[in-house]
Image (spheres, rainbow, N blue to C red):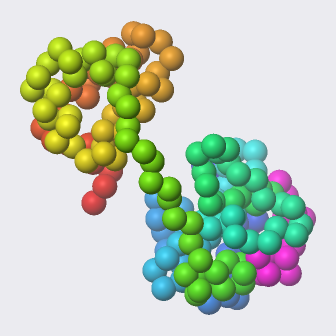
Amino acid sequence: MNSNETWTQELNLLKEIIHKTELEHAIKWGIDVYTYEGHNVIGICGFKSYFGIWFYNGVFINDHMNVFVNAQEGKTKAMRQWRMNSIEDIDESTLISYIQEAIANEKTGKRWVAEKSGKLEITGLLAEALEQDQQFKLSFEALSPGKQKEYFEHIQSAKRAETQQARLEKIKPMVLEGKGLNDKYKK
């Protein structure tokens, strides 16, 4: 069963509340996203054990009710989630105030700007492979820093050496073609 089907009544109530604001509805990544002048402000979705609303730039909202969680500490910088477990958890007036603050932030251009990371130091198995194969190295160096980082993190995130090796073998043809790891998902 789809997690959104579990929370149909709750998500419909959230939609009714959100429609009282000036946000525009869109479907992005298969979920309900609400925008202001084309910029993502909030999204809603149901999961296995909860449903919720997330604020793309929630870091700037005064969370006076202390309801926000950062879904991925250390990774997610600006997005904040408000997780709920029942329809009784939906407090319309508080929700509207949070949404209005998010809209006001969007209107003033208050957005999280990603920090530029320093020069990427390639280590481990990928570094060894680059040293051993000159064509692979030239192709890798021709990629943008972001694509290089995606490949490096993809290999490094594997816990087992066998998995790292399998990932390296899988990415080699993509690198040689000048493709990024996630290019097939981008328009």
User: In this rendering, is residue 156 above or below 101?
Assistant: above
| Residue lying at 67% horizontally and 44% vertically, measured from the top left | 73
Q: Residue furthest top?
A: 162
In the picture provided, is 82 more to the left or to the right than 93?
A: left
Foreground residue among 121 and 67: 121
Front residue of this view, candidates 148 and 86: 148
The residue under the point 30% across, 39% down is 148
Q: Of 92 and 178, which appears nearest the observer?
A: 178
Pick out the residue farthest to the left.
135
Instruction: Kindly give the residue lying farthest to the front in the view shown.
Output: 118
Residue for point 11% across, 23% down: 134
In percent of width and height, residue 89 lies at 87, 63
Q: What secondary structure prevails in the magenta region?
A: helix
Q: Total marks drawn?
A: 0
Report the span colored magenta: 85-98
Q: Is residue 93 magenta?
A: yes
At 38% from the left edge and 31% from the top edge, which residue is drawn? 121
Q: Name which quarter of the figure residue 68 lies in.
A: bottom right
Q: Position of residue 118 (x, y in %)?
A: 42, 45
Determine if the magenta segment contains residue 142: no
Q: Quadrant of the N terminus?
A: top right
Evaluate whether residue 116 shows in this view.
yes
Residue 44 horizontal/vertical position (percent): 64, 64
Residue 54 as seen in the image, left or right of residue 121? right
Vertical side of 6 occupied by 26: above or below: below
User: Is residue 103 shown left or right of residue 13?
Assistant: left
Q: Indicate the quadrant containing the C terminus: top left, top right, bottom left or bottom right.
A: bottom left
In the depicted view, which residue is nearer to us: 73 or 15?
73
Residue 158: x and y in percent read: 46, 21
- Residue 12 visible at all: no
Report the side of 88 relative to 54 (left or right). right
